[in-house]
Amino acid sequence: MEEVKLEKENIKVLFVEDEDLARQKLGKFLRRRFEEVELCENGLDGFLKFQEAFTSGKKFDLILSDINMPKMDGLEMLEKIREFDNEIPCAFITARNESENLIKAISLQVTEYILKPIDLEEITKKLDKICNNLNLEKKFKAQKSELDNYLDIINQEALVSKTDLKGKITFVNDGFCEVSGYTREELIGASHNIVRHPDVNKSFFEDMWTTIKEGKIWNGTHKNLTKDGTTYFVNTKIFPIFDINRKNIIEYMAVRFLVTEEEQEKRKNFKRFIEQLTEYKKTIGKLKTDKENLDKRLIETQKTFSVLEEKARVSEDKRKSLLKQLEAYESSNLQHNKMDIMAKQDKSKQFDDMYKSLNALKTKNLKLENDLKTMQAMYDSKNNEVSNLIEKEIENQKRINELKDLVSNLQKENGELRVKKGGIFK
């Protein structure tokens, strides 16, 4: 049956263990699960391998290490690593349960503590927990990066400001300062009506404040006034920002877009971009869900594989036991087997002789058949020649008879002529 290749987790693991058997066995287990696993036999080699990867920009995602090792133990190694990276998760695997080590391990932010002898089911659960946290952290960083990109795009395309509950400006972006003509220092702390245009009715802003105080989003197009008195139109959305419990409004944020032909086109392009990005995120979300389902199936398959390995080991032990029994049986019956073999060899020799004789008879018979065919061909050839000769003899005899008749007729005619001549000359 064709082997099914399982997708490995894209996590780079550094595994440090001084015992050769434990390192190779657990290393094999880890390589079935993770895309890249680096094995080291002591703490010093582990630190140097980590330092090399860190400085080259190809950092490890997870460290698994024994504590008691030559050259540099696991705690000393982790102390050195923490000088470079305070966030990388680390799990210690050890045969001892010393409180001093545990306290030091906690101070070094050790993620897990696994006791020997290693239980594969236990270590799988702990690896699942660590990997889940790693994946969540990666997702968080990716989402944060994505959010920063959105904010950067908005900062480039929109006029953004924040106010407190009384309408005092607490934040403005560069675009707001550039369009309004005010510096950031002039705007922070000032009332937002600093850019209000006198032509806009009070009822317009009363409706706006009523809407946002109710916790709703307000949207509208209106004109503002720059510092030098120039009018500009903006399309504005104001968002109430709540506290962590989503009960009380703590501030307001406004996002504005200039309403000009050029800015409108930019807004349309940006809207299309956001729609495409949203669709892309949905697709990515579905793919991530599919991957998570595959990861679960992989874990179940690994568990099944472990069970099958154990069954294979038991079967191998049984096979070895049966092999020993067979060897004992063969040893006790060796003499009898030798006699059987000799008898079989004699029969085999007799058979070979008979086979050779049969082949010789077949060869001789084949030769006789070939000779017979040759003689038959010669007979057929001679028979044809005799038939041809007979036909020629018959034809010659016929011609002889015809010649005889001709001679006879000539003689007869000649005699009659002589008689006539004799009568005339008498």
Image (cartoon, rainbow, N blue to C red):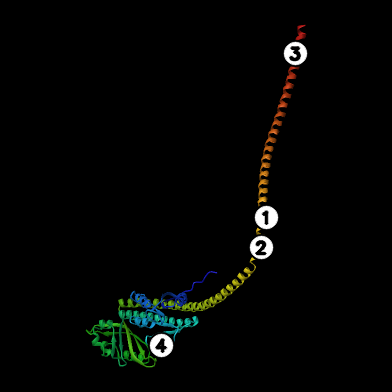
- Of badges 2 and 1, the one in the foreground is 2
- Amino acid tagged 3: Leu
Q: Considering only vertical position in the picture, is 215 above or below 76?
A: below
- How many angstroms separate mark 4 from mark 2 (CA)? 71 Å
Query: Which x, y percent locates residue 128?
Result: 46, 81
Using a 10 Å C-alpha cutoff, classify the residue at mark 2 as few (fewer than 14 neighbours), some (14 to 19) or many (20 or more). Answer: few
Query: Which x, y percent locates residue 53?
Result: 36, 75
Residue hosting label 1: 350
Residue hosting label 3: 417
Question: Residue 425 versus residue 333: which sits nearer the camera?
Answer: 333
- Of badges 1 and 4, the one in the foreground is 1
Looking at this rendering, what residue extends furthest in the top direction?
Answer: 426
- Of badges 3 and 1, the one in the foreground is 1
Query: Which x, y percent locates residue 136?
Result: 41, 82
Question: Residue 53 versus residue 214: which sits nearer the camera?
Answer: 53
Classify the position of the N terminus by image quarter.
bottom right
Q: Earlier in the sequence, mark 3 or mark 1?
A: 1
Residue at 25% x, 81% y: name it.
178
Using a 10 Å C-alpha cutoff, classify the residue at mark 1 as few (fewer than 14 neighbours), some (14 to 19) or many (20 or more). Answer: few
Look at the image and tell me whether residue 258 can be seen.
no
Residue hosting label 4: 102
- Amino acid tagged 1: Gln
- Amino acid tagged 4: Leu
Looking at this rendering, what residue extends furthest in the left direction?
Answer: 228
